[in-house]
Amino acid sequence: MRLNDITRTTGFRIGLLFLVLFSVTSGAVFAYIYFQTYGYELNLIDSALARRAKVLSQYEPATLIQEIEEGSRNDTTRREPRGLFNANGEHLAGNMNGLPKAPFFDRPFEIEVTNPGGSRRVLRMLVHELPSGQFLALGRDMHDLREFHELLVQAMESGGALVLVLGLLGAAALGHASRRRIDAVTRAIRRIVHGHLSERLPAGGSNDDIDRLAAVVNNMLDELERLMREVKGVSDDVAHDLRTPLTRLLAGLERAERRAKTSDEHAQAIQSATEEARGLLATFNSLLRISEVESGARRQGFTSVDLTRIAQDAVEFFEPLAEENGISLRLNATKPSELVSGDAQLLFDATCNLVSNALKFTPKDGHVVVETRHVGEEVELAVRDTGPGIPEEERDAVFRRFYRSEKSRHTPGNGLGLSMVAAVAKLHEMKLSVGDAAPGCRISLIGKRVTASGQS
Amino acid sequence: MTKVLVVEDDSATAAEIAATLQDHGCTVECVDTGRTGLVRAVSDAFDVIVLDRMLPGGLDGLGMLATLRGAGIDTPVLILSALSDLDERVRGLRAGGDDYLSKPFEAIELAARVDALTRRRSRSAEPESRVQIGELEVDLLKRTVRRGNRDIDLLPREYALLAYLMEHAGQVVTRTMLFEAVWNYRYDDRTNVIEVHIGRLRRKIDADGEPEMIHTVRGAGYILRAP
């Protein structure tokens, strides 16, 4: 990985931004503390000088000289030099050799002096004019404060350098890490693009931004993979299930071509071919309808639909057929209306498919009950029968297109009825489940209840 | 003879429709754009217009229909569409269509619907209160049914079925048409169930020994006619 790549990563840039922000704020804080401390120290020195000048100026001239001389003797390191000068600036007493050129009286100023040892020092000075016309000069060595100042500046420089180096390294590390994550994700995406649809984006496990994004993309991939599998399954099933009637159709026509002699025989062949083709067309229509439902476009036309009304219509529609087959078909609704948001036509179709299925598998003298009820915020429409039931292991499979269980292989139907129900359930975000009614099975659709405006 | 105007841009489909309707005894004229369709519909008296929903050029099926109705021409219109959506049907009927058929459709279905539209036009004078076919009599106000001297008791759906059959007496009514008219849902291939309903109705209308009035037309639907 080139350095150039790292500097372009978001991680590095954010690291850099933080470094700059941190440097500026810490510099400002540092400067503030520095000026405050320095000013405070200077203030201490200045007020000490002023106090000393005030004390000395109250002495009698004779005691003053004595006092200055004594103070000078004690000040061996010349940290606090002092001197008394006459009006002409000639030295009268003290360890200060000459009257420094003061720009003004009674206000502290700084001068540089050379000590007898040869070392140069900075002094904070105050010159006071005594009532006698003499000048009193007081000094304070600034060495300590200077040292403090230098130390502080040094600390700031080295600390700054350290922050800069560490910050840059940190930013580079951040950049490198994010670059590596992105590279790993990019590689995974490339593999997916090349057809390895089972590949997933790597997650770092820290649930950070990239992880969250990767999780979303992975979910999308799961769904895509499932859909791809389904599409493949469907086209396999379509091919397989349409081949049989097509073969039959072709065989019938060929046979007629070879053997049919009379026009009656021809008519017979044409009629059975037409019926076969009509069946094929119906199968295609069902498939198209399922895929139309699955496309979700019909969700736009959703209105509030009464499930009980739908169930009632379906029961009424199938009742004569049930009676003919010696089965009792009835509606069991706990309430006169159960509203959901949906497409009445599709919900009716789905209910019809369920009822039709139930009637198909329920033996004579059996019962089929269509139930609607609500549980809390949910509404359930269920069709219960006293047929043979659906074995546990087949309960998911029955919703696949063209799935025919062993028991249903010899009953009429194209194996698309329950697929349609599943598609309608999915469109309505309803939970579709197959349960045991012992004996028989109970297929239920559970959706969210909506309330008619103003009512509960 | 019934004159039909077919507005359909796909020439193969148009030929198919024309052949079906000609076999059915209609004279058919085909045009392939909404504009020429409009011109023809305005300048000549047709009994029925079969109109494709999607047409090339500026004027599509619904646009042409709206213009036609705007011009005060109330020739019955059967809309054909590849869009099987329920909304499409509603939109088509709202735009002034009289019936709606989604492709692919069977020839017999088209013929039966064109028949029904022609019939509606020739009859729709004022709402009748009584319909009589042969010795079968329906009182549309009291909702009572008699055959000869025999009162017939019908369930509401059976009555609705019979009323529709009576309204279209003497012409083939397909199962799809019955289902849409009586149950108000779109048809989704529940052939044998409709058959059972008709069977029930038939047992009540055609009692033992009486000549049959409700006949099954093989592969198509039903027809009610005087024996």
Image (cartoon, rainbow, N blue to C red):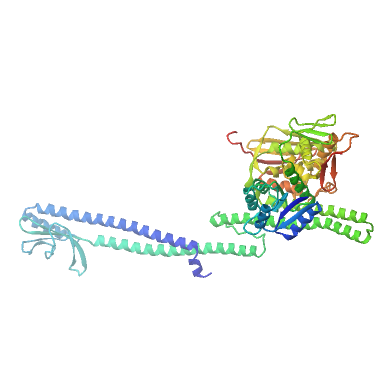
Residue A309 in the image: state x and y as whole percent.
70, 36
Q: Is residue A281 left or right of residue A61?
A: right
The one nearer the camera, A432 or A393, is A432
Residue A263 in the image: state x and y as whole percent.
92, 56
Q: Is residue A18 left or right of residue A229?
A: left
The one nearer the camera, A40 or B158, is B158
Residue A264 drawn above or below residue B181: below
Residue A139 drawn above or below residue B152: below
Quarter the C terminus of chain B occupies: top right
Q: Count the marks.
A: 0
The quarter of the picture where residue A137 lies is bottom left
Residue B135 in the image: state x and y as whole percent.
84, 34
- Residue B187 seen anywhere in this rendered image of the structure: no
The quarter of the picture where residue B198 lies is top right
- Residue B163 seen anywhere in this rendered image of the structure: yes
The one nearer the camera, A356 or B56, is B56
